[in-house]
Amino acid sequence: MKSPLLLALLTLSLAANACFVVRELRAALAKSPAAHSAASTSSHAASRSAATSAQLSSAPITLWQRLAQGDPAALATLRAAGWPEQTLQRLAAALIDARFHTQNSALENPSRDYWQEHHRNAAAFDAFAQNRSAQNHEKAALLQSLFGDAYISPEAQAPAFQGIPREKAAAILAIKADYASLRRDLNETPNYSNSSYEELSAALTREERADIARALTPGEFFEYELRSSVTASELRYNTAAFEPTEAEFRALFRIKNPLDEPAFDLDAAAARKLRKDTEAALDLEARRILGEARFQQFVLSRDAEYRRFYHLSQHLQLPTETARTAYALKANIDHRSRALDADPATTPAARLALAQEAESRLTTAFGSKGMEIYKLNSRYLELLRVPPSERPRTR
């Protein structure tokens, strides 16, 4: 079931599309025959523009309905009125979506008594998923029939397809749609053990990747995976605090991607073990590629506490150096805290003084607002005040 927020966003989207259509219609209607005549030296062009304006003003609703049905004559009418091609593609897609909306609403929100909660059963969910899949195919076919090779779907314009020919992008989208259908079938099939499900899911992932690789050249496949693969997503996340250059990111991906490839042939537990075993190999190559100074920053960026300070400094729009300063400060406080823990004569007042010093110095670095955020997400300052016996085992 869609969340209330998602439904609200959908409503706003449809409203925005409606405003878009009205705005473009008014612009078209504003093109009077006289204006067309003044802009053209050809009396034939002026007559055609006048006829087009008459069509738009006499039956605009019918025109939109025809375009939503994929009528090429309706598209020709709007082209004759001077509508830009990109605008027409967006308009046609919005009208087709609006045509499907009523049908989707009936499936998504079937009639029920207002006091009863709606629970969609497996059959209803399957019907809804199949209907959406069929609609997506119909929409793609309609837009392709209207605009031919000139049509570029929003999906094909995603960053993952940068530098990939349009026809190959379309082929990849078709492959992904086929495997999405297979995954739905797998998820809806009962009586699978966890191990069998994981094996089948891994097989689908492996075969999908192989099919995409066959559709592209090696260079294209590398660029596609660089932007869309799980390995690339993990690398982007894990190197956020490292702030790599493009060249550094590409170099790290070239190292990491081959190390991750065997994981596609393993179950989840074996894949996790493999990734842990190959981390040393990754570090060895990264040190060689990055050089010692940048490699040490790369290692630091994987530290959970440093990441906490880094993301806080980014949120507050502070320099990255602020995170490094805070991390060094924490390391110093930790060293002194361990010394207090080792001394049987340590008093509560000594622990309190150290905690207050840490809070004061971190407040200097991040400000009072930053410290409020830090305290909401970390118990570090609180735990400095208590002896080891009162702290959680993991600190």
Image: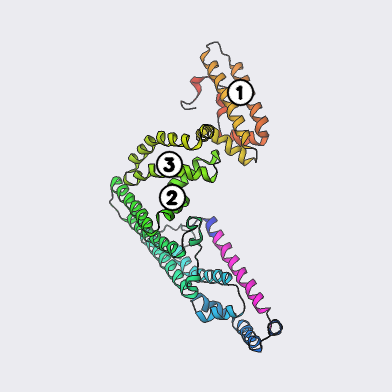
Three-letter amino acid code of the residue under disc 2: Ser
Range of magenta residues: 9-32
**Residue in the foreground of this view, choosing between 1 and 381:** 381
| Residue 16 magenta-highlighted | yes
Location of residue 48 (image quadrant): bottom right
Residue drawn 34% across the image and 39% down it: 269
x and y percentages locating residue 110 in the rendered image: 45, 65
Residue drawn 61% across the image and 20% down it: 354
Image-based side of 15 in relation to 102, left or right = right
Q: Residues within 10 Å of mark 1 (few under 14, many from 20)?
A: many
Residue drawn 51% across the image and 14% down it: 342
Image-based side of 269 in relation to 90, left or right = left
Image-based side of 224 in relation to 74, left or right = left
Of labels 3 and 2, earlier in sequence is 2
**Residue in the foreground of this view, choosing between 318 and 104:** 318
Mark 2 highlights which residue? 229
- Circle 3 sits in a helix, a strand or a loop, which is it? helix
Mark 1 vs mark 3, CA separation in Å:
42 Å
x and y percentages locating residue 134 in the rendered image: 40, 67
Of labels 1 and 2, earlier in sequence is 2
Location of residue 273 (image quadrant): top left
State the residue lying farthest toward the top.
Answer: 345
Vertically, is 350 above or below 77?
above
Mark 3 highlights which residue? 255
- The circle drawn on residue 355 is 1
x and y percentages locating residue 287 in the rendered image: 47, 34
Three-letter amino acid code of the residue under disc 1: Ala
Can residue 112 be seen at all in this image of the molecule? no
Location of residue 32 (image quadrant): bottom right
Mark 3 vs mark 2, CA separation in Å:
14 Å
